[in-house]
Image: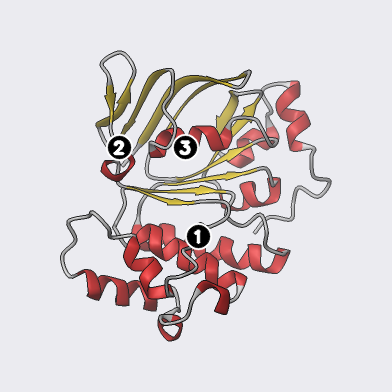
Amino acid sequence: MSISVNIKKRLNGFSLDAKWSIENEFAVLFGRSGAGKSLTLKAIAGLMKPDEGNIASCGAVLFDGSSGVDLPPQNRRFGYVFQDLALFPHMTVRGNIEYGLTGKDAAGPAERVENILDVFGLGRLGNKRPDEISGGQKQRVALARALVGRPRALLLDEPFSALDAPLRAEMGRILMEIRREFNIPVVLVTHDLAEACGLAGRLIIYHGGRVIQSGPPEEVISSPASQEVASLLMLRENRGAFY
């Protein structure tokens, strides 16, 4: 399992020039707000079309600017969790999760929904609506919906930014369990250094629309490749408070 990205995009005066690749690992796109992290994630998912370049996953070409390949999001088989979670308020918890199977050739969809409700501890909440459950429970619903279709990778666009510290830590532990249980690549966007280093197997540093360093967190922290990287790593005073 792998994801490779080599794309360029100009948008409203901003230039994105991102190149990186990962295997079956937990990767974190880290940098200040507006550095191009979320734009990259949208490009991978097929929600934004690059001007040029290519994106591939598990040997399959998802986008190639030179040949005109541009698979629609539903054919890329990625689970995606938005920053605002994007749960449907008129649907129950079960209905929101079932939506993750829409358009997929899924055997035994009802059984899969019930199984993933149990995996995320949501069995008793299946008939409730999003406004009837807690913030942490909404996070689990969004993750369950993203994973019920058995995606080739999980993409997360700062889904925990609105949570307080204890809930963020809890969701971090859940993500690590997801990695072990589903054995797929996870790509998380964040500008929180503690969150990034507590979760990442590979830290991909963004600055001004470009990737300026990539590697294991301990390697990046001990040997920043530039003054820009060193500056980003000093955004938090306590760099040891990782999950």
Label 1, label 3: how many angstroms apart (C-alpha)? Answer: 20 Å
Mark 1 Cα within 10 Å, few/some/many (few <14, many 20+)?
Answer: some
Q: Amino acid at mark 1?
A: Leu
Instruction: From the viewer's perspective, tell me whether residue 8 is left or right of residue 95.
Output: right
Question: Nearest the camera: 126 or 181?
Answer: 126
Q: Earlier in the sequence, mark 1 or mark 3?
A: 3
Q: Amino acid at mark 2?
A: Pro
Residue 42's label in the rendered image is 3
Label 1 vs 2, first from the N-terminus: 2
Can residue 190 be spotted in the picture? yes
**What label does residue 31 carry, if any?**
none
Q: Is the N terminus in the top left, top right, bottom left or bottom right quadrant?
A: top left
Q: Secondary structure at mark 1?
A: helix
The answer to whether residue 71 is left or right of residue 11 is left
Asked if labels 2 and 3 touch by Cβ distance under 8 angstroms, the answer is: no
Numbered disc in front, either 1 or 3? 3
Residue 33 at x, y = what percent? 69, 37
Q: Which residue is mark 2?
A: 72
In the image, 30 versus 44, the foreground residue is: 44
Question: For the point 55% across and 64% down, which residue is it?
Answer: 173
Quadrant holding the C terminus:
bottom right
- Viewer-closest of 190 and 222: 190
Tag 2, which secondary structure? loop
Residue 201 picture location, percent across and down: 51, 45
Residue at label 1?
Answer: 175
Tell me residue 129's x, y (percent): 49, 76
Mark 3 burial class by Cα count in 10 Å: few <14, some 14-19, many 20+: some
